[in-house]
Amino acid sequence: MIRTFAALLLAAALAACASTAPYGAATKPNGPGYSEMRIENDRYRVSYRGGANAEEANNRALYRAAELAVQQGYDWFIVDQRVVEPGQRSGPSFSVGVGGGSYGRNTSVGVGTSVGIPIGGGAKADASLEARFGKGPKPADANAYDARQIMQSLRPTSG
């Protein structure tokens, strides 16, 4: 019975570590997903929270910027600012508790231990970028992206 429970717990922990929230808009402030804010007619701040790692968070922010560019009738975008914050994974924890009590002439002492295993996958990575949109041929800039090519090459596989 204990082996079965341990196997199920290990499987749940591994599944949680490998899982990523589906690509989509954040449904609450600071929730997982993308969000954007228009800064000017051709400039947006795009964020993605909850990537499994820094690369995924960055790619999903780029993908959202590409979606916005195409939706607004633009061909390309330049990333003027970018911040990627890798999530700090928390490991297992161990704790010990000691307690005592007495009742009449009887006294007892108890010791308890616990091991905590984070099955939620720990902290997730976040990315934020400021994108400036444009039309026509893509500029010869290392931070310039063709919006339609990004939508093809970075299309999220989940969600």
Image (spheres, grey):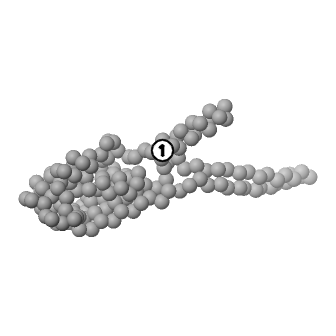
Q: Secondary structure at mark 1?
A: helix
The one of 101 and 111 positioned closer to us in this rendering: 111
Outermost residue, left side? 136
The amino acid on which the numbered mark 1 sits, given as a three-letter code, is Ala
Residue 42, percent across and down? 14, 63
What residue is pinned by disc 1?
16
User: Depth check: 80 or 41 in front?
Assistant: 80
Give the residue at the far right of this rendering. Answer: 105
The image quadrant that residue 69 belongs to is bottom left
With 122 as the anchor, is 115 left or right in this view? Answer: right
- On the question of residue 73 being in view, the answer is yes
Counting the numbered discs, the total is: 1
- Residue under the image location 27 percent in, 49 percent down: 154
Residue 1, percent from left and from top: 66, 31
Q: Name the quadrant of the C terminus.
A: top left
Is residue 31 visible in the rendered image? The answer is no
Q: Identify which residue is drawn at 43% across, 44% down.
A: 19
Q: From the viewer's perspective, is residue 112 above or below residue 135?
A: above
Which residue in the rendered view is the most extreme toward the bottom? 80
Picture coordinates of residue 49, whole percent (x, y): 36, 55
Residue at x 7%, y 59% (from the top left corner): 136
Indicate the position of residue 53 as horizontal and vertical percent values: 40, 54
Q: Is residue 28 left or right of residue 88?
A: left
15 vs 128, left or right, is right
Which residue: 29% across, 50% down?
A: 25
Sort mark 1 into few (<14), some (14-19) or many (20+) by Cα contacts within 10 Å. some
